[in-house]
Every structure is written in C-alpha cells, then in structure tokens.
Amino acid sequence: MSQILLATNNKEIDAAIGGDAVYFREAVYEAVTRAGAKTVVLSAFLPGQAGLADVVYMLRRQDVRVVFLAGSMEVSDPLFGKLLQYGVYDIIFNPVEPVRIVDVLRNPMSFAQAASILALPGDSAPVFVAPQNRTTVQSEQLVTNVPTPAPAEKVKRTNGAIGTIVAVWSPAPTGKTFSAINLSFAAALTRKTALVDYTGAAHTWLNLPKGERGLYSSEPCKQTQSATNAGPDVYTFDPMYTQNGGPNPELLNELRRKYNLLIVDGALPSNAETLIVVADHDIHHLRLIQRALPSIITSDHQNTLLIVNNAARLPYPIKYKDELDRDAVAVIPYCPGTVAAILCGEPQILSDPLLKKTFERIAAVCATGKANIISLKRGKVS
C-alpha cells in the first residue's frame, strides 16, 4: 500500500502490511514529510518522549490520516477525547491484527462508529471554583461568591475608554481555541466583546470566510462577520503586523477602545492584563507549561488564571497547586459535543447551559479586574 507510514512498534505487522516503518514517536513527523505519506498507522505503545496527542496533532495539521492502534488501552483514557477532536475515528483495540488494520485502511470508520466503540458517556458538568473558596464542589454546584454580572445592554465604548485585553495561552494543544471561543461568546452576552484570531483556528471552528475578508488581509486587523448575531466581533491579525512574536500592542490598543473585552487566541500580547493558561491532564503538556510559565508572566498580567480542559478522574489526580503554583479556577470535563460544534460552526456554550455559566463566570472575573485570582507572587493565592 502506497503512501502509508507504519509506526506500529510491531515488525510482524509491518511485514504483513508492507511500507516504510519508524520505531520512535519523534521520527514519525519527519518520516511523513520525507516520504509524503498520507496515512500513518500509529501504535499507542510506540516508544518515545513526545506526547501521543502532540504527534497526532502535528499529523492532523497536515491532513494526514491516522489509524490508531489502541491495543489494551482503557476506553476511559482522556486521550480518546483528543483523538475525536482531531478527527481520528479509525481506532483499533485488541486483537490488533494485520487483517483488521487492512480492513480499516480500506474502509475508514465514521464518528458514529468510533463513538460506539468508545461508549462515550453523557456530558458531565464543568466546575467553576471561586477565588475565595478553593474546595472541591459537586458536579452541578457553581460557587456564587463571585458576583454574577446582571444582564445588561451591550454599550459601545466611548473614545478614551479602555477595555481589558485577555490572552488565552498554552504551549501545548490543550484547548486554547475551545476556551477562547466559548469565553468570547459568553462575554458577548453582557459586554461588547471582540475575539482576535491570531492563528486562524477560530475562523476554522466558526466556519468564517478566508477570502478577501478573511485571513491575512491587507489590513493589520480585519473585522469578520460574527457567527451569530449574539456573538463577538471576530478579527484576523496579519502576521506582518507583529512585535516580538505577538500582535502589535498599538493595534490592540486601538481595538480595545471599542470593546469591554478583547480576547486574543494564539498569542501573548505584551499589554494583556489577564493571562488565561489552559492546561489538561496530559503530563507531557503539563511539563511544557511548567517550563514556559515563569518566563511569560510579566508585571502587566494583573490576573493569571488557570483553566483545566478535558478533565478526567484519574487514580492519581494532578495537583496543579504543586505543579504550577496555582489552582484551577475552572475544571471542564471532556465534552463529546465538541466535534459536532465545530461542524456546525458554533461555540459549545450555545448547547451546554452549565458550560455557558462557567465561561460567564470566567468572563466576569476577566472584566471586573477586581479578583486577583492568582497573585503575581508565585505560590500565593489571594
């Protein structure tokens, strides 16, 4: 079979199927680029230091099909949620045999088939942890000691007024765009809000145009029609107009005079008052955040908030206070409807009331500027 790269960690399978083979995770991407492979048969037990989710993410970014050999993995492993988000539906559990692999290569599985194999559970509720109360809350309880903003008519900023810039950041694929889109739509319910799409990921999610009014237009910031009338204004940022690897602060300052909240996805503007760090339960992602975090927090970040996406019940839960010197203000479980939301071009808060309420609370913290959820002094929680 042509244009197939084998990363099965099993020489018998490689010999039966035929094709180029690699035996370490770190070699997969380079081999795909060199051979021009369109499909990768990837084993969950392929040796290497790179995270499996990272390997799959890089392959899917190049539109490479992934057939995932799960073997003896538990269906409850949070990795499968990421695979579905990345559009990987070809998942094979034990017995992993060449005949089954060949059958899947010839007959790709659908999302419905993958969901049936994984026995996806119903949605569980996100949890918002208020700054004054860090104790664990039950699944449907939302702590209410952070004032919920009263419904208000959206009012344009007058000249001279300054809105808040919020950067949604992570050095790993932990759900930055998921968080930025849902946060911006939740904020837009009560505030005039803009979403600055620095990488193009939000345009893809919301099915926004990429033509003359889309990505990389001749203007440094280009407004695009929002996905719904109630949503935020979505802007594209031209990479030509950058400074130190992020959007030019002067251009963002021009935009912030028009909005209460300016949410930036995929970049770290130097003039952002609030930094939202997005993590998940992948230990490799956690280590990346751990190494990068001290160097990116500046005195301009009055608030630094931690959100945990794709949360799962682990035998040994990650203690974010110990690992990152900060607690999570929001814990969001894996949401099975994410793929459907992308296909529909909608944020998930439109169909998930509890998720909506969680992001409304986060938006309130970002906008008020009152709650220093995590102080700048490492390890001190105010």
Image (cartoon, rainbow, N blue to C red):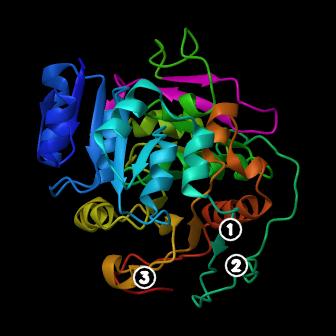
- Identified at 70% across, 78% down, the residue is 139
Residue 164 appears in view: no
| Quarter in which the N terminus is drawn | top left
Residue 203, x across and y down, in percent:
56, 29
Considering depth in this image, is 140 or 52 the residue closer to the camera? Answer: 52
> Residue 124 shows which numbered tag?
1
Q: Given the image, on which type of amino acid does mark 3 rest?
A: Pro
Cα gap from disc 2 to disc 3, whole angstroms: 17 Å
Q: Which residues are magenta?
A: 221-242
Q: Is residue 143 left or right of residue 196?
A: right
- Identified at 38% across, 48% down, the residue is 268
- Characterize the local packing of mark 2: few (<14), some (14-19) or many (20 or more) Cα atoms within 10 angstroms: few
Mark 2 or mark 3, earlier in chain = 2
In the image, residue 380 above or below residue 336 = below
Residue picked out by circle 2: 139
Residue 177, x across and y down, in percent:
51, 45
- Characterize the local packing of mark 1: few (<14), some (14-19) or many (20 or more) Cα atoms within 10 angstroms: some
Considering depth in this image, is 382 or 338 the residue closer to the camera? Answer: 338
Q: Is residue 279 left or right of residue 1?
A: right
Q: Given the image, on which type of amino acid does mark 2 rest?
A: Ser
Residue picked out by circle 3: 317
- Identified at 21% across, 45% down, the residue is 8
Residue 54, x across and y down, in percent:
30, 48
Residue 82 appears in view: yes
